[in-house]
Amino acid sequence: MMKRRVLEIIVVISLAIMAVFSLTVSQQRRTHYSFDNHKMSYDGSMKKGKFSGQGSLKLPNHDKYVGHFENGEFNGKGTFISHENWSYSGKFISGLPSGKGTLVTSNNKKYSGKFVKGEFHREN
């Protein structure tokens, strides 16, 4: 009788742990999408049908972003490389450079520091 009671308790605890785990684990999955006759592609994590987590996006004009996405936007650390030969590496918020980052222009000038809503702010 005691063994059965212990076994029941172990089963109940195991089920509770599995239920909590299944509810808290992100529903992200890795995927590959091509759009516009393969002119645009995304490789990375998706959540609820939106780019979310780590991924890379190649655009039809040959711009490329590699980094973190949230709700389909660049959010978190990432690198944007323009087809016009400039790049930004750093933090993004809602698709814009915001926070600490480095912009390298097409003529190789570097601007490192704080960006706010896509604009560079010189530190005095």
Image (spheres, grey):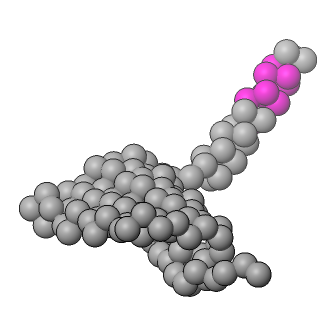
Is residue 40 visible from the viewing direction of this image? Answer: yes
Outermost residue, right side:
2
Image height of 89 relative to 44, above or below: below
Nearer-the-camera pick, 115 or 91: 115
Splitting the image into 4 quarters, where does residue 92 fall?
bottom right
Residue 34 picture quarter: bottom left
Q: Quadrant of the C terminus?
A: bottom right
Q: Residue at x 82, y 30 (%)?
A: 9
37 left or right of 118 in image: left
Q: Quadrant of the N terminus?
A: top right
Q: Main secondary structure of the magenta part?
A: helix
Picture coordinates of residue 12 (x, y %)? Answer: 75, 35
The structure residue drawn at horizontal position 58% and vertical position 80%, both measured from the top left corner, is 120
Magenta-colored stretch includes residue 60: no
Between 81 and 94, which is closer to the camera in this rendering? Answer: 81
Location of residue 24 in the rendering, given as x and y in whole percent from the top left corner: 65, 52
Give whichever of 21, 100 is nearer the camera.
100
Q: In this view of the protein, which residue sits in the foreground, 3 or 31? A: 31
Residue 109: % across, % down: 47, 68
Is residue 7 depicted above or below 92 in this figure?
A: above
Q: Does residue 98 sit above or below 23 in this rendering?
A: below
Callout count: 0
**Left or right: 41, with 81 as reference point:** left
Residue at (24%, 57%) from the top-left corner?
Answer: 41
- Region of the chain picked out in magenta, as a range: 4-12
In which quadrant of the rendered view does residue 33 lie?
A: bottom left
Residue at image point 60% right, 77% down: 115
Instruction: Mark yes or no: residue 49 visible.
Output: no
Q: Residue 37: image x %, image y %?
A: 9, 62
